[in-house]
Image: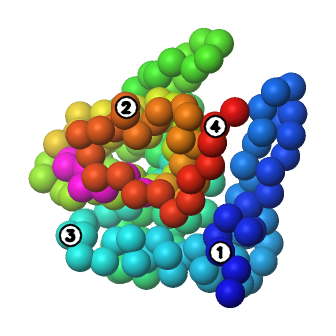
Amino acid sequence: MQKIEDYIKSIPDFPKPGVLFRDVTGILDNAEGLRLTLDSLYRALEGVEFDAVAGLEARGFLFGTPIAAHFGKAFIPVRKKGKLPRETVEQSYDLEYGTATIEIHKDAVKPGQKIVIVDDLLATGGTAEAAVKLVESLGGVVVKCLFVIELLDLNGRERLRKYDISSLTQFPGH
């Protein structure tokens, strides 16, 4: 049986020279890879009490939605600014060359709700940290942050050290 990392493609010099991009579409375009990954995500949540899954745009949607459906929970889309139709709350975070802003619907999280944050990749942790802040600003409790891939050298785990973090695969970060 193959491992999840066998389905992840490494693309050199994307999106810029010197970067080795870890591409999850190799998981998505292979039924066995997708099943293996989803089953592993489900196992990572065994015993975790939660009310909803917050998935980060865009690849967090691909993994977070089936998790929510599998466990019979709500799915909360965390989107780039300006993409959600109702009243939102937003959180900005630093990028290598500037800032970005994500948001969720203001009524997406109820006070005391237990939330799992899901994304395909943990790199520097900036996007995940911003999602955590959004959930907490609405009174939610982040009970787990779950990633398919973790880039170890970029220290995103350190940024989220107060939270329960799981990643299915780890690679050096470039």
Residue at position x 73%, y 69% from top?
A: 6
Q: Which residues are magenta?
A: 140-146
Compared to residue 114, the image places residue 17 above or below, namely above
For label 3, the crowd category at 10 Å Cα-Cα, with few meaning under 14, some 14 to 19 and many 20 or more, is few
Amino acid beneath label 2: Arg
Q: Which residue is mark 1?
A: 3
Q: Earlier in the sequence, mark 4 or mark 1?
A: 1
From the image, state whether disc 2 or disc 1 is nearer to you.
1
In depth, the one of 15 and 78 nearer the eye is 15
How far apart are labels 3 and 2 at the CA level? 23 Å
Given the image, on which type of amino acid does mark 1 rest?
Answer: Lys
Q: Is residue 83 visible?
A: no
Measure the C-alpha gap from mark 3 to mark 1: 27 Å
Determine the CA span between mark 4 and mark 1: 19 Å
Measuring from the top left, give residue 163's x and y in whole percent: 27, 46
Instruction: Look at 51% across and 63% down and name the residue there.
Output: 168
Specify the principal SS of the magenta part: strand
Name the element at disc 3. loop
- Does residue 173 belong to the magenta stretch? no
Q: Which residue is mark 2?
A: 159
Give the label on residue 173, or none.
Answer: 4
Give the CA distance from mark 4 to mark 3.
Answer: 31 Å
- Residue marked by disc 3: 49
Label 3 vs 2, first from the N-terminus: 3
